[in-house]
Amino acid sequence: MPLSSEVALSTAHAMAAAPPVQLFLIATAGNVCGALINWGLGGWCLRFKHKRWFPITPDRLHKAETRFARWGGWILLFSWIPVVGDPLTFAAGALRYPLARFLIVVTAGKAARYAAILWITDVILPVFTAS
């Protein structure tokens, strides 16, 4: 469900459930692990691309290849976006994007997301809850 990790992180931070650095590291690591699973599934599932029941048409696979060729791995910085991120990480695996580069770019994008959530919880949220 989109936004559930953001809400959980913000709530845990607002309640001081753990130090912010610990919350940041756990949220980032968990989300990167999810992306890594998608990358692995993309690579594994591609071996079925010639089967009739394979859900990705050759045209869609070619479009994904074209996007990756145009934008390179930098497009994975957007893997944190709900709905868009999972197909990006799946496509990276299907297109055999190098794992080390994948982890660096995806981790950077997801870490920036969670740093922003913590900052919003600290700086922006109190403005709206102050009475």
Image (cartoon, helix red, strand yellow):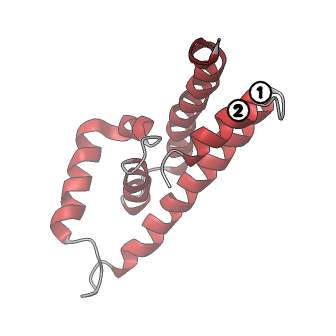
* Image coordinates for residue 32, horizontal then vertical, percent: 60, 47
Calculate the distance from the C-alpha at mark 1 to the C-alpha at mark 2. 5 Å
The answer to whether residue 122 is left or right of residue 86 is right
Q: Residues within 10 Å of mark 1 (few under 14, many from 20)?
A: few
Q: Residue at point 73% right, 28% down?
A: 14
Q: Which mark is residue 55?
A: none
Q: Nearer the viewer, residue 107 or 127?
A: 127
Q: Amino acid at mark 1?
A: Val
Question: Which residue matches tag 1?
Answer: 21
Name the image quarter holding residue 36: bottom right
Neighbours of disc 2 within 10 Å: few (<14), some (14-19), many (20+): many
Residue shown at the point (38%, 34%) measured from the top left: 74
Instruction: Identify which residue, 64 or 113, lies in the foreground.
Output: 113
Q: Which residue is depicted at the point 53% across and 50% down?
A: 99
| Element carrying mark 1 | helix
**82 lies above or below 19:** below
Q: Which image quadrant for residue 122?
A: top right
Judging by the rendered image, the residue that carries numbered circle 2 is: 24
Looking at the image, residue 99 sits to the left or right of residue 72; the answer is: right
Query: Which residue is situated farthest in the front direction here?
Result: 131
Q: Where residue 113 sits: x, y (%)?
A: 54, 31
* Amino acid at circle 2: Phe
Residue drawn at the location 47% of the way across and 41% of the way down: 80
Describe the element under mark 2 as helix, strand or loop.
helix
For the residues labelled 1 and 2, say whether their Cβ atoms are less than 8 Å apart: yes
Q: Quadrant of the C terminus?
A: top right
Which sits in the foreground, 119 or 69? Answer: 119
Q: Relative to the observer, which residue lies in front, 68 or 81?
A: 81
Residue 52: give x, y in percent of width and height: 24, 88
